[in-house]
Amino acid sequence: MLGGILKTGYSHHKHRKSSNVLETHGNINLMTATFNMGNAQCDEIDNLVPKNGETNDGKHLDMIVLGLQESTWLQAIYPSKFADRELSEKAEKANSQKSGTDLITEGFGFIVDRLSHFESPELCVNQLKSSIQTTLGDGFYLVAHNKRAQLQLFVYARVELKPRIREVHRSVENTGFLHLFPNKGGLCVTFILDATKFAFISCHLTAHEGVGKCQERNDSIKEIIGGVRAAHDEDRFDPTLMSHHVFWMGDMNYRVTFDPETPKDEGAFKETKAKESKDRKENMASNVDEAEEKEKQEEEEIDKKAISSKRQSELDRVGKMIEREQWEDILALDELNRENKAGRALRGFRPLQPSFPPTFKRIRQREMKKETSTPSTSWIGKQKQWQSGLDNSDKELRFYDYKRMPSYTDRILVKSLPGFDKHVVDVGMESCEGVLSSDHKPVRAFFQVATTVGVTDIKSENEESTHIQIEISNLSAKGLASMDLNGTSDPYVYVFADPPAVVNESSLKLKSTVIQKNLNPVWDPDETLSITLNGHDMEGLKKNAHLFLTVWDEDTLVRDMSFDHDLIGLIAVSFVDIVDAITTGKPIVRTDTLMANGYANGTLSYTINAFLPESNTVTLSAKKKGSSIFNLRKQLSSFWRGNGAKNANGDDDDTNAIIESDDVEITETEDYHRDNVAPKPQGCCIIV
């Protein structure tokens, strides 16, 4: 177990028995951390980054991932060290009173002017890199660094892991002003360690309280998922669908709230937003005379007093919960937990639950720590116990900014493919109270992750033998997303495996018939998809493989455009379950949610029968299929290759590659060549 966990922080341990970890290639000790630096230089980096990657009890970390937000700091010539926030709030208020045209025009100038007060981003980046590397020492190297404006994502690993890491890829998605500016958004780094696909996503989401802001955060998450991609997968699939393990971190800005109202469903919310947008434009175009404006201000003053009284009570309640260490009671009011449980935010992810004081909004240069010399259960500061009351004029008693509800805005979540969740063991999570420079406290979590070898660990058979046979039938779907302009879709089901090499080339039927213009299709009960595997190594398949059921919308009218073959959704089935079906003789009968780009796009019902036929003679081709377990493009593109255009050299056209820049790199291999007729992403990163 990683020790302590580490110095200076409140820890939370939630263990799983190590015997639950499946037999794998090897275990790595991983630390993930998120830190909103608050536009201030951090002089306590060693309170966040373990010295030489070692814990207090001598355990060695193998990989360290840091997601940073607001990670540039102000020049000394700026009048107030933290005045940028006041400048931002004033500008936001002024802009809200302008017309849409003025807002767009002046928005560009304001952001350029605001950024001019900061140190050179490269200077901040270089200082951070130097301090982190110095703390970690020569035993670590920088696997990847992704940045966009004030967002940064660092991935470090021990130098011994370098030969085992490949296909490192970076991508970004902006969700800020006009969905163009990078003040908010997400960064993604993906790579393969041994044969295990990792994805790390760091984000900074919409700030402020209220159900509307919560909905914006939910929408931003979907936008990030829909925009980032991994080089090792077919680029219609977002990394949260295809990576074996996804670690999500960031200043997610979800708040502690007493408001019982929750975000509306997606359809109703879009209608509401459209109406609000229309109302705003009408209000901007109208002139409000002085009398009406005065009356409005008087009403706002009355509302403000009522709100203050209600706010006082809520702050006091949360303050008492913190003093009594009632973390579960605080988390019962947490927006992220609520939205995740309802499936509106990061469906399928598991939020780690804090057991320490809320990390936002802290008063800088103050540290809360438990008084160990007395039996008191209060959380205290360096001198006095924390007070939360609005009527308390003595600010020296406070550890939170009373203008904000203390909240767990800084979070870490985990998601694994089915059957692989036991490969990740939670060791613990803690806040880093020793970091004093920001109004956020960093949060870091520790894991033991088991990696797999992949296709080389699955025994295949190149001569006549019995091979596992999989049959998928009784297909039907409900509530599919509309992918066509006419409000419907033309769905079909396609099945593939990962690693692709486990599927024999003689497989009979991988694609269903197309059902035209139907969002609730039911396929013929006699229609069966049939897959033959290379051999019958059930233990190898359980450790390394997945079966994927995908539903696509066929578009036969515009086959050379990105509208062709839209992905409606994907379902992953673990070979652990398929092997169980073989050994028990019982079929898998399920109805699962189809996911794509963060959206739940309907459900798919199916039956899987898997068996070892008494006599199933299969002759493999003399040329074995490529062993790259991530070469999904070759497996999928057969449905579209017939209409592929050629360039002047007779090669497949590659004009649809994702845009690259200095901040966003795509690592390509020969296996990652893009056929212009293969499915294309619904959204791409906008490079500014």
Image (cartoon, rainbow, N blue to C red):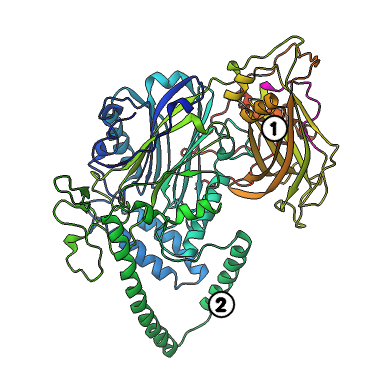
Is disc 2 placed on a helix, strand or loop?
Answer: helix
Give coordinates of residue 502: x percent, y percent.
67, 21
The disc labelled 2 sits on which kind of residue? Glu
Asked where in the image residue 66 lies, by quadrant, the reply is: top left
Q: Residue at x 41, y 25 (%)?
A: 28
The outermost residue toward the top is: 463
Asked where in the image residue 352 lies, by quadrant, the reply is: top left
Q: Is residue 650 in view from this perspective?
A: no
For marks 1 and 2 on the same chain, the one whose residue lies earlier in the sequence: 2
Inter-mark Cα distance, 1 to 2: 47 Å
- Tell me where the magenta segment starts and ends, as one range: 502-512
Q: Which residue is mark 2?
A: 282
Question: Which sits in the foreground, 156 or 291?
Answer: 156
344 in the magenta segment: no
Q: Residue at x 50, y 66 (%)?
A: 261
Give coordinates of residue 150: x percent, y percent.
38, 47
Q: Is residue 239 in view from this perspective?
A: yes
Question: Which sits in the foreground, 510 or 171?
Answer: 510
Q: Report crowding for label 1: few under 14, some 14 to 19, many 20 or more residues within 10 A (C-alpha).
A: many
Counting the numbered discs, the total is: 2
| Residue 675: numbered disc | 1
Give coordinates of residue 272: x percent, y percent.
59, 68
Asked where in the image residue 473 lies, by quadrant, the reply is: top right
Question: Which sits in the foreground, 280 or 263?
Answer: 263
- Dominant secondary structure, magenta: loop
Going by the image, does 341 lie left or right of 580?
Answer: left
Going by the image, does 585 lie left or right of 91?
Answer: right
511 in the magenta segment: yes
The disc labelled 1 sits on which kind of residue? Asp
Going by the image, does 245 lie left or right of 553?
Answer: left
Q: State whether residue 339 is above or below residue 528.
A: below
